[in-house]
Image (spheres, rainbow, N blue to C red):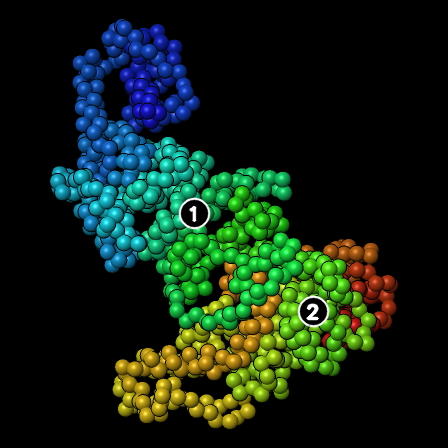
């Protein structure tokens, strides 16, 4: 009823603008009978009528003497009546069109073109595109797309060359001149929803997507017609949101999804006109779709090409950015409370998973994770009402589960993951509040941590930092309660007391005891003490501990890892004489480094981080793990001759271990008797990679992964980060931008940015070589890597340490503080600084 009333009012405004009320003395400036009214064509009048309806403008009543005013216009009464009759005949001929087909649109367009009056088309588009029922029935196909047809949608716009486009334009013009076929114009008529539902597959819809694209391409070039789409979307969206929220409309008619498919094909959605009202309302409506509908949209869009995916990403990103920069968000006005930003982020998630599904997927090759037996005894946490989180991670995205995939299954997405990150949003996001919503108020408040693809590594790392710190405080609290209840000795920290010259043995023994007795202690805050050395561990001692452990474990003399001089990467030594405890230790060390926000100087190929995230290594992973072997196997795959006769390879492989001993392995039983042929060479390559990356190091890697998961099993690490981001967390950034460090450095003790020695210091440091810069970073911060986000995120302080002297500069690595005496000249500054950074090891050096 409300829609009918609105339609009636808009029509009255339109007639008032084009024909007037008939009162010659009318004073309404929005009436054609008024002397002050500006004459406009029918297209402009249709758009103006919608605007007048929105603001509830004055509406004239028809005047009895309407015929008198007709002669006031220059044109004759006969001409006016004739023109008005033509307009009415065109208008009336399409009153019964309640849904559209491609041919029907072209038919109306042709009639309007002849009369040079596009108001009938604008009225039909406004009526259909503002009606959910009309839009759902529009542009139907006679049968569902096959998967091959869906895949063909990818390149339609991209693959057409200029000749094809010209031919298509000519064809369209011929169609416009010729009458539409009866079968085409009846698409969707008389087709029952039940019949359509039975035909549709999990990634198919009943709408003809190609036809929709052609229609938009023809119509969007006209500004007046584009305004009809805009206004229709404003009226459509609230009704759709209401239908989905309160009437469960999708469960009754699966074709309801058609309207979202049709609207999203509008290539102008990201234009400024849509950003204020239309697009935010539409995003809110789309975010109300049930999980099954969201999954279906993701599957459908996954068949689109990269350009279509990028267009949709830009549409939602444009809205997020527009809302962020046009509002002043703060801790009191959270971006999490902006409905438009939240809705756009949820819609962007659909496109994100479509991007993953449409990419290069590997849903197989999953690592078997070790199942830990559940204890039947009630823990103190459970007695206190504190629920223990799942050992495999606290959260899985429901849409991910519905689709049956994981981000880590995607080798190569359609477009880069980086295009989903919104930097303006990251800048205004209050991560402490967002983390609280993520962990506590997930039902009532939206957390952007549920859409980790939109966050950069720096923001996600901050969320992980909060999670780690809260777990540390939780373990500390539990320790205090245990001490009160059971009388145990209070030990709220993970204390490691080690000797510098026996660091591996001491750390291994201590961590093994903790892992066996109470693995939860690994989640306490780390506190390291070097025997015989002074220094309170507020971060700096832990950094040095990690650095020394890594240097020792990766020492080639120990033989735990093999080193490839070509790639400068380490790999697990399958012939290592060390026990599994050593590998568990390095896994714990990597976990503790993430947990305690420290950076390690480790060099693994990416396949190690993929395996830590649950994926096995495959042939493609050899590209960076063992590029020489990868190239050889690829040449075998691509060889055009007779593999069996020319290469004489069998399913028995041989290689040399770290100590120079020759080893052989049968990829299949009696492999030395099975030749590699053109038919079975793909199997040979797959099994070769499987052996090198998985089977040969299975024992070592399982111990390594077990140690890593001892620390990180309850962390949202796997939920938030991709393998390449895990590497960034552990190793830091290799890019050292000292100009960024100079910009963020603070000064104390009398120094300022304009002090003479400070200017000389930075000039000297910028002239250092790459290795000298790394030594300086190691001396000042305890590591030679930049943190996540680069050196600009490192808060370094340079403090004055007295007047000119022969003493060397010193540092507090735990606070990233450099204590710099005020040397008399640049040469002395350079000499003292180089000596300090070159010979810096241990605590207490002056």
The vertical placement of 162 against 62, above or below, is below
* Residue under the point 38% across and 10% down: 27
Q: Does residue 308 appear to the left or right of 509 in the view shown?
A: left
Q: Which residue is mark 2?
A: 543
The vertical placement of 805 against 687, above or below, is above
Question: Around disc 2, counting alpha carbons within 10 Å, would you say few (fewer than 14), some (14 to 19), or many (20 or more)?
Answer: many
The vertical placement of 216 against 403, above or below, is above
Q: Nearer the viewer, residue 63 or 688?
A: 688
* Residue under the point 28% across and 83% down: 678
Q: Position of residue 693 (x, y in %)?
A: 46, 78
Q: Does residue 548 appear to the left or right of 59 in the view shown?
A: right
Q: Position of residue 738 (x, y in %)?
A: 65, 63
Task: Examine the rendering and report whether any part of residue 528 can be seen.
Answer: yes
First-in-chain label (2 vs 1): 1
Q: Position of residue 47 (x, y in %)?
A: 34, 27
* Residue under the point 25% across and 47% down: 197
Determine the secondary structure under disc 2.
helix
Quote the CA–CA distance across marks 2 and 1.
Answer: 42 Å
Q: Position of residue 41 (x, y in %)?
A: 29, 24
Q: Which residue is mark 1?
A: 347
Question: Around disc 1, counting alpha carbons within 10 Å, would you say few (fewer than 14), some (14 to 19), or many (20 or more)?
Answer: many
């Amino acid at each position: 009823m409300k829609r009918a009333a609105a339609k009636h009012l808009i029509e009255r405004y339109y007639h008032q603008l084009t024909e007037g009320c008939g009162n010659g003395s009318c004073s309404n400036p929005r009436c054609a009978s008024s002397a002050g009214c500006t004459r406009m064509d029918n297209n402009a009048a249709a758009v103006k009528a919608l605007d007048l309806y929105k603001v509830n403008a004055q509406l004239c009543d028809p005047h009895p003497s309407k015929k008198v005013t007709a002669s006031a216009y220059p044109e004759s009464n006969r001409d006016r009546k004739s023109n008005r009759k033509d307009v009415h005949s065109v208008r009336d001929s399409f009153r019964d069109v309640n849904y559209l087909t491609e041919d029907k649109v072209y038919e109306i367009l042709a009639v309007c073109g002849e009369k040079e009056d596009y108001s009938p088309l604008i009225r039909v588009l406004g009526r259909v595109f503002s009606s959910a029922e009309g839009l759902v029935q529009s542009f139907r196909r006679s049968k569902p797309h096959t998967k091959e047809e869906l895949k063909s949608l990818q390149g339609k716009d991209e693959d057409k060359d200029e000749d094809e486009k010209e031919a298509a334009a000519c064809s369209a013009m011929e169609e416009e001149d010729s009458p539409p076929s009866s079968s085409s114009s009846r698409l969707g008529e008389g087709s029952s929803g039940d019949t359509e539902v039975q035909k549709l597959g999990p990634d198919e819809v009943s709408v003809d997507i190609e036809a929709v694209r052609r229609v938009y391409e023809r119509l969007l070039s006209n500004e007046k017609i584009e305004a009809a789409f805009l206004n229709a979307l404003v009226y459509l969206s609230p009704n759709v949101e209401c239908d989905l929220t309160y009437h469960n409309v999708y469960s009754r008619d699966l074709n309801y999804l058609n309207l979202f498919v049709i609207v999203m094909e509008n290539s102008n959605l990201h234009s400024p006109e849509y950003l204020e009202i239309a697009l935010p309302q539409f995003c809110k409506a789309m975010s109300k779709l049930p999980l099954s509908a969201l999954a279906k949209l993701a599957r459908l869009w996954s068949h689109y090409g990269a350009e279509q995916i990028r267009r949709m990403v830009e549409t939602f990103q444009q809205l997020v950015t527009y809302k962020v920069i046009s509002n002043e968000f703060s801790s009191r006005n959270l971006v999490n409370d902006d409905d438009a930003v939240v809705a756009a982020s949820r819609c962007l998630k659909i496109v994100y998973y479509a991007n993953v599904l449409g990419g290069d997927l590997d849903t197989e090759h999953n690592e078997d994770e070790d199942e830990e037996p559940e204890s039947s005894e009630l823990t103190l946490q459970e007695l206190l009402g504190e629920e223990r989180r799942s050992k495999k991670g606290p959260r899985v995205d429901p849409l991910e589960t519905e689709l049956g995939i994981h981000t880590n299954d995607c080798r190569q997405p359609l477009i880069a993951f980086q295009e989903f990150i919104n930097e303006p949003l990251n800048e205004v996001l209050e991560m402490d509040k967002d983390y609280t919503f993520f962990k506590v108020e997930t039902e009532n408040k939206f957390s952007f941590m549920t859409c980790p693809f939109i966050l950069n590594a720096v923001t996600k790392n901050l969320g992980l930092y909060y999670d780690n710190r809260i777990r540390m405080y939780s373990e500390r609290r539990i320790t205090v309660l245990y001490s009160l209840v059971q009388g145990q000795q209070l030990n709220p920290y993970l204390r490691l007391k080690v000797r510098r010259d026996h660091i591996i043995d001491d750390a291994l023994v201590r961590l093994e005891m903790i892992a066996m007795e109470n693995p939860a202690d690994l989640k306490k805050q780390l506190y390291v003490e070097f025997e015989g050395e002074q220094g309170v561990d507020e971060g700096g001692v832990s950094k040095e501990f990690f650095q020394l452990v890594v240097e020792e474990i990766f020492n080639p003399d120990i033989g735990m890892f093999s080193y490839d001089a070509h790639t400068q990467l380490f790999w697990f030594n399958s012939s290592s004489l060390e026990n599994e405890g050593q590998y568990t230790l390095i896994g714990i060390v990597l976990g503790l480094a993430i947990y305690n926000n420290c950076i390690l100087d480790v060099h693994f190929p990416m396949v190690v981080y993929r395996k830590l995230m649950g994926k096995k290594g495959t042939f493609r992973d050899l590209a960076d793990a063992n590029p020489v072997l990868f190239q050889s196997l690829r040449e075998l795959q691509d060889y055009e001759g007779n593999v069996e006769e020319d290469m004489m390879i069998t399913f028995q492989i041989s290689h040399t271990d770290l100590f120079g001993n020759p080893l052989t392995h049968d990829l299949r039983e009696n492999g030395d008797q099975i030749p590699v042929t053109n038919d079975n060479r793909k199997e040979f390559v797959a099994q070769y990679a499987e052996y090198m990356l998985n089977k040969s190091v299975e024992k070592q890697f399982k111990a390594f992964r077990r140690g890593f998961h001892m620390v990180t099993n309850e962390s949202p690490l796997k939920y938030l980060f991709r393998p390449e981001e895990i590497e960034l967390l552990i190793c830091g950034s290799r890019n050292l931008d000292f100009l960024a460090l100079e910009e963020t450095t603070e000064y104390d003790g009398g120094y300022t940015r304009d002090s003479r020695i400070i200017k000389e210091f930075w000039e000297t440091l910028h002239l250092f070589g790459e290795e000298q810069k790394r030594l300086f970073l190691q001396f000042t911060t305890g590591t030679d890597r930049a943190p996540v986000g680069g050196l600009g995120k490192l808060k370094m302080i340079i403090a004055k340490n007295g007047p000119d002297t022969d003493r060397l500069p010193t540092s507090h690595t735990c606070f990233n503080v450099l204590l710099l005496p005020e040397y008399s000249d640049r040469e002395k500054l350079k000499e003292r600084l180089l000596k300090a950074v070159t010979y810096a090891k241990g605590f207490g050096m002056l």
